[in-house]
Amino acid sequence: MQQSKVVQLPLTPPEHKVLVTQPYVPSLDKYMHYVEKAFDAKWLTNDGPLLKELTDRLKDYLGVKYLLLVSNGTAALQLAYKIKNLSGKNVISTPFTFPATTTALEWQNANVILSDIDRNSWNLDPHAIEQRLTKSDISAIVPVNIFGMPCDMEAFDKLGKAHNIPIIYDSAQSMLAKYNGKSVLQYGDIHCMSFHATKLFHTVEGGALTFNNKEDYERAQRLINFGIGENGVVEEPGINAKMSELHAAMGLCILDDLPMLIENREESVALYSNKLADVITFQKSKNDIYTPPMYMPIKFESEDALLSTLTQLDQHGYTSRRYFYPKNHEFLQRKTPPLLPVSDTISNKILCLPLMHNLDKEHIYKITNIVKRSM
């Protein structure tokens, strides 16, 4: 049989722009070192040795007992909501988040109740929820650690215990974050993480869940493999949310380099913060926290100032992005939009500046000067 030909596709050179972010790509030799193991074993998916190696190394790195790697962060959310049986139930979450947080709840047929955010941390405000918990039949709370900054985790955990409801954290951006000296993964019932290519730690596409309950973890193991139990019998309807060996190979490469990647981005964040400290409002927390260098969000005093800066950056070859805009909650409650004054105001004023591995300092100087001139 004749071997198929390799067709060389024409490559269009990218525009000379600095993007808002860019995936870190390890050396091809390093990636192939891991991929060759999968090829030699002819084991490309279904709980292979690379997946097990990545799982064990991540568990050790993060200090968690029950960790499950999955195909993407949205699947992680869907699994968490399924495990906590939220179909048809009332669930409180934040309006200021990436759409997946709440669209996954919609897919689970949950009744999404949005509550307002804290004006400094931009995270879901636990104090705004307390009245709702006493007056409503709430079955879960889904806080999000926005831009990797931990929310008030002790407050949410107290609410969960007081009202006997699970706290499911959308930690898509905060795998490495710390709250009061501990990993954020030590709080709540389930954490859902994204390992998308744009994240600090990534597997190209992928995600993970961590659990504080062994039964939830074991059920999730079945659900990601069509609901098949250890005896090979389908015990309940499941889905296919497994991570492949090739994605795990990328994760192993990134994990090898992670300390270097963190240090490099932290230097960029520190330079941005120093240059913009007098003119811009940054995300802030009243708690003792560590926020991993995932994004570079800044808040303007007005939407006009934001739009002026965005235009000027674009004209000088710098891509910035409005997060989370337009308001993601409007499609959920078009008929009776909730009163969310803090979120509605802040969502018009947040802009993320370029942040990636090995971002040249000269770019940061130019970007910050543009921001200052546009104010």
Image (cartoon, helix red, strand yellow):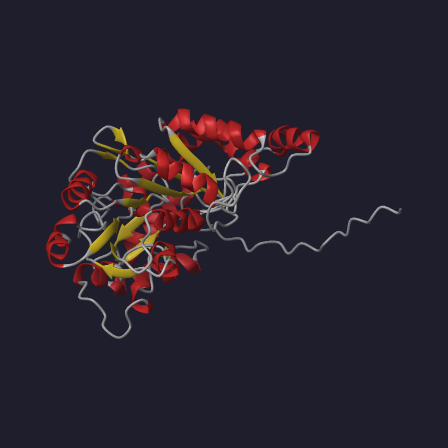
Residue 44 x, y percent position in the rendering? 63, 38
Residue placed farthest to the top in the image?
60
- Residue 218 found in image quarter: top left
Residue 253 position in % (x across, y down): 53, 31
Residue 217: image x %, image y %?
39, 37
Q: Quadrant of residue 66?
A: top left
- The residue closer to the viewer here, 232 or 74, is 232
The reply to whether residue 20 is in sight is no
What residue is at 29 percent from the left and 47 percent from the top? Answer: 146
Which residue is found at the position 39% from the left and 60% from the top? 107
Does 34 appear above or below 293?
above
- Residue situated in front as seen by the camera: 216 or 275: 216
The answer to whether residue 148 shows anywhere in this view is yes
- Image-based side of 28 in relation to 82, left or right: right
- Horizontally, residue 217 falls left or right of residue 350, namely right
Which residue appears at 21% of the width and 62% of the height?
345
**At which x and y percent is residue 115?**
20, 58
**Camera-side residue: 142 or 254?**
142
249 on left or right of 3: left
